[in-house]
Image: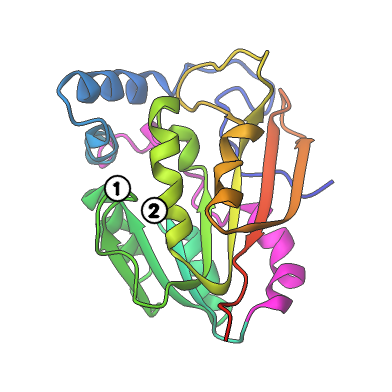
Amino acid sequence: MPESPRREDPTAGGAPAPDRRARARALREAAAAAGAPDRWCEDLYREAASEPELIFWADQVPNPNLTARWENWSRDLPPHVDVLVTGAGYGDDAGWLADRGARVTAFDVSPSAVAAAAERFPDRSIRWLTGDLFAPGLRPTTGFQLVVEIYTIQVLHPDRRAAALAPLAALVAPGGELWIIARGRDEEDDPGELPWPLLRAELTPLTELGLVERSFEDYLDDETPALRRFVVRYRRPEAPT
């Protein structure tokens, strides 16, 4: 069993707690109604400047699912690997990767989150960007040797996820890898509310986009209540010579 991921669930630890997702859901609904479905992220991070608990997923530590696998999985990557961190939030994963010698680019759709991350890690050589998977400008000519996607796809409404997969796959360079960490569910499970756990079938298009699935882990973590996790590793084959 891998280490427990960061505590997403407001009741983790046993004692009942207020639903810290409620404000995020309200902002998402308002933004969607206004025709700007991603604006809620910036609205939430801006409010979190005075109410940090609103960012319910931010423990301000690197994701344990990432740290537990790094030593083994990174052996297949070049030294000082070029990494892209999607939906970087307050930057903990990006900062941790930079400490391991990676050349890190990190982006978030929220300018407030990007500014806070840059302020938290001023001594790291990280390229911080504001952007999203639906906008151009993130992908270098050759792509990234590693793309790390943690808990971002699951906050996209299910009717927008399919459109995010092609630009996500396009970020991976030939010979590079994509690592995805997300909550998971089966078709018969309640899809719930923000965040929406992923179906395994929702990730199938990534293989149709030229990526090869190297491993797929599906397990219950040790939180209370336990949360189901998907941890997936893809690779893009080297371009033919």
Q: Residues within 10 Å of mark 1 (few under 14, many from 20)?
A: few
Residue 162 location, x and y as percent? 44, 37
Q: Which mark is residue 241?
A: none
Dot 1: what SS? loop
Q: Which residue is mark 2?
A: 167
Q: Is residue 55 magenta?
A: yes
| Residue 49 can be seen, yes or no | yes
Name the foreground residue: 116 vs 214: 214
Magenta span:
48-77
Q: Is residue 8 left or right of residue 120?
A: right
**Is residue 44 or residue 213 the one in the foreground?**
213
Figure quadrant of residue 81: bottom right
> Residue 138 falls in which quadrant of the image?
bottom left
* Left or right of 196 on screen, residue 109: left
Between residue 113 and residue 177, name the one nearer to us. 177
The three-letter code of the residue at mark 1 reads Phe
Residue 96 x %, y %: 54, 68
Position in image of residue 149 (x %, y %): 51, 52
Residue 235 located left or right of residue 218 = left
Q: Which residue position is annotated with label 1?
A: 134
Marks 2,1: beta carbons within 8 A: yes
Taking the magenta stretch, the answer to whether it contains residue 145 is: no
